[in-house]
Structure formats: C-alpha cells, structure tokens
Amino acid sequence: KGKKLAKSSDKSIDLTAVLGAGIMGGGIAYQSAVKGTPVIMKDINRDALDLGLKEAAKILGKGMQRGKVDATKMATTLNAITPTLEYSTLKDADLVIEAVVENPKVKASVLQETEETVSDDAIICSNTSTISIDKLAESLKKPERFCGMHFFNPVHRMPLVEIIRGKDTTDATVNAVVAATMKMGKTPIVVNDCPGFLVNRVLFPYFAGFSKLVLDGADFTKVDKVMEKDFGWPMGPAYLLDVVGMDTANHAAGVMADGFPERMESIENDPVTLMYNEKRLGQKNGKGFYNYG
Ligand code: NAD
C-alpha cells in the first residue's frame, strides 16, 4: 500500500536532518545513514552527539561480528552522519525529524527555529510519542508540510513507523514521508492524530490490564513467562515496561487517561506509578520489575 501511495512527483528525500541525538534521534540518524541517505544530527549538547555516534558504531560493530557488515559499510555509514550543534547546517535538508525531549514548549521553539532555517519545500516531522500533532503544528507558518513520524525503540530493530496526519497535512507531505520511511527500510502506517496514535492505544490498555492482574495477586514473572514463552510474544509486559521506562510509561498512561477517560480508568496503587515514585525506572537505571546488574 505504501508503495502505491508514493508517486514519482513526490518530493525526494536526499538529505535528512534529525534534531536531538538521544535514544531516538541517534537511532533515526543511524537508520537513515545505513540505508544510504546522508543525515545531519543536531543536538544542543556535544556529549549527546558523541553518544549518538558511538551507538551507531556499536550497532555496526555487532553487525560486523555477525558477518553482516564489512569495514567499507561501517565507514560509509558513519561518514554519512554529520554531527552538529548549529541550526544553519540544516538549510539544505529535505526532511527534518524532530526528536528532542518530550516537552511541548521545547518542541515548539525547535520547530519554529527549524522552519526559519530550512527551504520552503522541506518537510518537517516530529517523533513525539504523546503530544498532539495539530497542537505542535500551531507553532509553524506552513503546517501543511508537517506531520508526525513516530519510530519505536530500538529504532534499528523495530519495523513500524506511525505517520500521523494532522488536519492541515497535505497528501504530498504524507506521500513523501511514506516513501522516506520505506527508503529507511521501515514499514509505514498512516494514522490520524489522537492520543496514543495506534500502537500506544493498544499497548497502554494492555499495560493497565497487566497492572490490575498484579494487584489481584498475579506473580509478574509468571505473567511474563506466559506471554513470552507460551503465548509467543517477544517479551512479557513487565519486561517491556522495564524497556520503555516507568517515567515514560507513567507519563504516557496519563496522556491516554486524559484522552480516553472512559477506557483508561485510574488504578489505585498502580505498580507502574509506585515504581516511578520510588525511582525504579527500569533498564535505564538498572532497577524496575527486574534488576539489571
Ligand atoms: P532523550 O532524552 O534520549 O534525547 C533527547 C535529546 O534531545 C537529548 O540528547 C537532548 O540533548 C536533545 N535536545 C534537547 N533540547 C534540544 C534542542 N533544543 N535542540 C536539539 N536537541 C535538543 O529522549 P528520547 O527518548 O530520544 O526521546 C526523544 C523523542 O522521541 C521524545 O519526543 C519522545 O517522546 C520520543 N519517543 C521516545 C521513545 C523511547 O522509547 N525513548 C519512543 C518513541 C518516541
């Protein structure tokens, strides 16, 4: 379906820029580079840029160990990522993907500054997980060239990208982003703007169901075993929450509850909230449902 959507008249993406070199921005930059589209990776912090590049080198190193990547591929991929602290380097980008912190004010100012720098026909996307695309679009003069482009973590392994169409997003913008997603080796799905988009609308009620099971006395390790080993999903809910992080999960659950109060009733003593309050954040700080040494 994605292939049919993209037309030869659609804008081609020859240079990508990613704003934010964190977990997601670094992963998106790597994915663009490894699939042959050069990418500018911008952050406000030199250490974040170094970490983003290191992460790309680590993924390529693992590929080399498995014999899937050779030295030339490693060098060309790393050379295709240009780290920068300056907005001015974005001026020739065809597609800018914003992946800075999940804060509406920071995102709005980053999007405004981007629009002032890039050409009139450049496409601008946000990788936000929870903020309304129409709300973010209000910060732009040309909202028709803006949409959501929601990757999943870890970017190099997760096939799906949700492309979120805002009320002003044009078909040409959606088509170009669908084509760019496929060029990055990912599977695009076009969805409307709503809290949680598609995946998190399914995932967060599932997490809520899991929390209630635990409060009913279920052993979370057994639930994980059933969902993973017996039911056949890649991982169970407790382990997945540790990967997502209790801070992110707690915030996103709140957004979902605000958006769909009739479907996401609040859970007294929700284990996710309790762990967040106790700073058991999951894999990012070594302790969540499980301990990571
Ligand atoms: P992160 O904290 O790892 O990285 C954010 C980066 O943005 C940092 O390196 C920070 O220095 C940089 N930054 C902050 N202000 C900036 C600015 N003004 N200009 C340029 N860079 C700036 O965060 P993350 O987990 O990579 O999340 C980034 C975005 O992706 C968020 O909107 C988040 O909701 C979304 N997202 C996250 C995940 C996930 O699992 N982590 C999954 C999907 C989407």
Image (tube, rainbow, N blue to C red):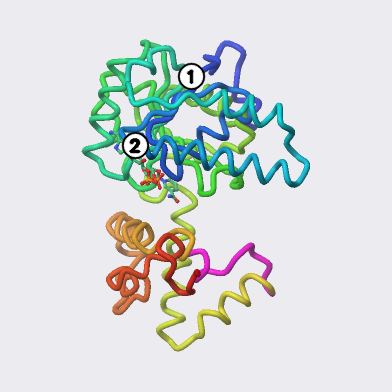
- Which numbered marker is on residue 172? 1
Vertical position of residue 69 compared to residue 169: above or below: below
> Is-magenta flag for residue 234?
yes
Report the amino acid beneath label 2: Ile
Residue in view at x 61 percent, y 72 percent: 227
Residue in view at x 41 percent, y 37 percent: 21
Residue 245 percent coordinates (x, y)? 41, 61
Q: Is mark 2 within 8 Å of ligand 1?
A: no
Viewer-nearest residue: 48 or 115:
48
Vertical position of residue 199 compared to residue 139: above or below: below
Crowding at dot 2, Cα within 10 Å, few <14 / some 14-19 / many 20+, comes out as: many
Report the amino acid beneath label 1: Ala
**Ligand 1 position by quadrant:** top left
Vertical position of residue 47 compared to residue 217: above or below: above
Circle nearer the N terminus (2, 1): 2
Which residues are the magenta region? 230-241
Viewer-nearest residue: 107 or 145:
107
Q: Determine which residue is flagged by label 2.
A: 133
Query: In the structure shown, which secondary structural element does the residue marked by tag 1 occupy?
Result: helix
Vertical position of residue 40 compared to residue 133: above or below: above
The answer to whether the residues at label 2 and label 1 have Cβ atoms under 8 Å apart is no
Viewer-nearest residue: 276 or 209:
276
Crowding at dot 1, Cα within 10 Å, few <14 / some 14-19 / many 20+, comes out as: some
Residue in view at x 31 percent, y 45 percent: 102
Residue in view at x 35 percent, y 31 percent: 167
Q: Is mark 1 within 8 Å of ligand 1?
A: no
Report how far apart the C-alphas of labels 2 and 1 lie in the structure: 17 Å
Residue 269 percent coordinates (x, y)? 30, 79
Query: In the structure shown, which secondary structural element does the residue marked by tag 2 occupy?
Result: helix
Residue 179 percent coordinates (x, y)? 58, 25
> Is-magenta flag for residue 269?
no
Residue 15 percent coordinates (x, y)? 51, 18
